[in-house]
Amino acid sequence: MTQGKLLRIIGYYRDPGFLERVMGTLRKLWVDVEWVNARKVNDEGMYEIYMEVKEGKNTQLAILNLSKTVDVERVEVLEEGKVITYSFNNKGEPSDNPNEERMIVYVPVYSKVTGYSWGESYSKDIHG
């Protein structure tokens, strides 16, 4: 299990301000970000941001505010989850050597999603 909340944020990257708005909305309420992974989903500019944020008294409010942010389609809390870590060196080979330059990728594994879009919430189980 994680120490914080795992989030998936779906939104449109029209300019670099998209990432700034996401991070700024969290930092405005003193919510710390542990890690971030992002990827482009389609040619229309839709991006998926995965992150882990520390749990705190303002975390839920920050998630609701984020769901109402410009260019954010929805924010999903990935519940009952854990994070699997993969580490690769600059040759693309798996590596756990701390003396080697490497990229670490965090992959959330979860079984329930609670989503927020413009303040409205929904929930779904992933069991299938």
Image (spheres, helix red, strand yellow):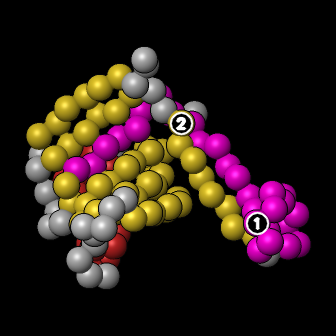
Look at the image and tell me in which quarter the N terminus lies: top right
Q: Nearer the viewer, residue 33 or 48?
A: 48
Q: Nearer the viewer, residue 7 or 64?
A: 7
According to the image, label 2 marks what residue? 109
Q: Residue at x 88, y 72 (%)?
A: 99
For label 1, count other residues whose C-alpha is less than 10 Å away and answer few (under 14), some (14-19) or many (20+).
few
Residue kind at label 1, given as amino acid type: Gly
Question: Disc 1 marks which residue?
Answer: 92
User: Looking at the image, which residue is at 23% across and 77% down?
Assistant: 14
> In the rendered structure, which segment of residues is drawn in magenta?
74-100
Q: Amino acid at mark 2?
A: Val
Compared to 9, does 102 lie above or below? below
Where residue 33 appears, x then y in whole percent?
A: 46, 61
Location of residue 115 (image quadrant): top left
Q: Residue at x 76, y 66 (%)?
A: 92
The quarter holding residue 15 reads bottom left
* Disc 1 to disc 2, C-alpha distance: 23 Å
Q: Is residue 11 magenta?
A: no
Q: Secondary structure at mark 1?
A: loop
As drawn, the label of residue 45 is none
Q: Position of residue 10 (x, y in %)?
A: 29, 55
> Extreme bottom residue here?
16
**Which residue: 21% across, 60% down?**
72
> Where is the C terminus found, in terms of image quarters?
top left
